[in-house]
Amino acid sequence: MKVYIPYLASFFLVFAFGIQPGVAATKNGFVINDPLIPIDEIVSGGPPRDGIPAINQPKFVPASAASFMDAGDRVLGVIIDDVARAYPVKILDWHEVVNDQIGSQYFVVTYCPLCGSGMVFATNAAETRLLFGVSGLLYDSDVLLFDRNTESLWSQLMGKAVSGQLKGIELPQLPALHTTWADWRQRYPDAEVLSTDTGFRRNYSRSPYINYHKTRRLYFEVSKKAPGDLHTKELVLGVRTDEGTKAYPFSALEAHGKASFVDELGGRSLTIHWNGDAGTAWAVDGNGEVLPTTIAYWFAWYTFYPESLVFSSPVHQ
């Protein structure tokens, strides 16, 4: 599978014209000029720019050699050109960004531990490849990435540049499955897995966010408070299409009790799949294509998509 970013013309136009005048602020070394989001809501997460180091030269080992992985470990899994790769969340907790390539497809694997959100984006633009890092800045508790090409800031959950030369540009999201290592390995026994040989000294057996997912407390304020009928950090499957957005809370999927069912979003038919044992869900369109979706904490999905419809199990209606 090859994905090309459809903004090639815009990409070179912004390079030609550069940053617009009227600089508003400098944060963590980034010049932020007239951003798409409120500038006073762009806050420091603590680390400086690159204080959370991206992995730029990832190494992989075959599934059979991944002795550091336990069955219940969470992974983000992608499959491109019949190559299956797993990115352990226990590594992503420490790095948040992996710049990678399969064949001619460049992509970036991103994970925000504060939002529980894992998303993969294509980064090809003809002969240009965007390389991403962690800015150390947050917006609505979500990581703001930056590309090293232009130092534009990108909101992960928006999938969009919110300031800089590429402001307003969106990256194509690629399908990725947030599941357990056991589930992914069963699906793809010949999969490759990101090695703990990252070039950095980190204790990948221990999360720096231990027990964070269990509490309702947030480390950082958000602009929109999610309704309290769901736990703040309940995982939801977030679906975003041209027809609208919808959240599928895991508790509702569990109560629904179906491994798959047909649902509708803005008149578009979707098949929602649920695997309670692996704690994962995904969506397929009417043509059988797996859609890019996002598993995230409820508070995070609601903050960015408050207009989102919310699936409720018929047994609870």
Image (cartoon, rainbow, N blue to C red):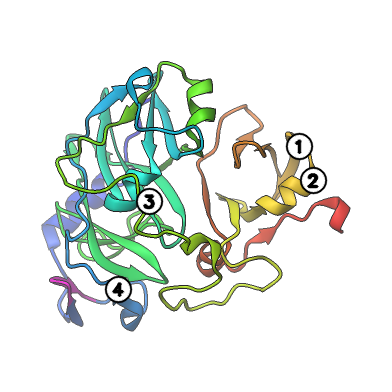
Nearer mark to the viewer, of 4 and 1: 1
Nearer mark to the viewer, of 2 and 4: 2
Mark 3–mark 4 CB contact (< 8 Å)? no
Between 12 and 304, the one lying in front of the other is 304
N-terminal label among 3 and 1? 3
Place of residue 131 in the rendered image (x, y in percent of width and height, measured from the top left)? 19, 46
Place of residue 21 in the rendered image (x, y in percent of width and height, measured from the top left)? 15, 77
Q: What's the amino acid at mark 4?
A: Pro
Residue linked to disc 3: 111
Q: Estimate the spatial distance between the alpha carbons at disc 3 and disc 4, rounded to whole Å.
A: 23 Å
Number of residues whose C-alpha sits closer than 10 Å to that of mark 3, classed few (under 14), some (14–19) or many (20 or more): many
N-terminal label among 4 and 1? 4
Mark 2–mark 1 CB contact (< 8 Å)? yes
Between 270 and 49, the one lying in front of the other is 49
Q: Estimate the spatial distance between the alpha carbons at disc 3 and disc 2, rounded to whole Å.
A: 28 Å
Could you tell me which quadrant the N terminus lies in?
A: top left
Q: Is residue 263 magenta?
A: no
Q: Estimate the spatial distance between the alpha carbons at disc 4 and disc 1, rounded to whole Å.
A: 40 Å
| Residue ID at (49%, 32%) | 71
Residue linked to disc 2: 256
Nearer mark to the viewer, of 2 and 1: 2
Boundaries of the magenta span: 27-33
Q: Estimate the spatial distance between the alpha carbons at disc 2 and disc 1, rounded to whole Å.
A: 10 Å
Tell me the SS state at disc 3. strand
Nearer mark to the viewer, of 3 and 4: 3
Q: What's the amino acid at mark 3?
A: Tyr
Height in image: 279 above or below 43? above
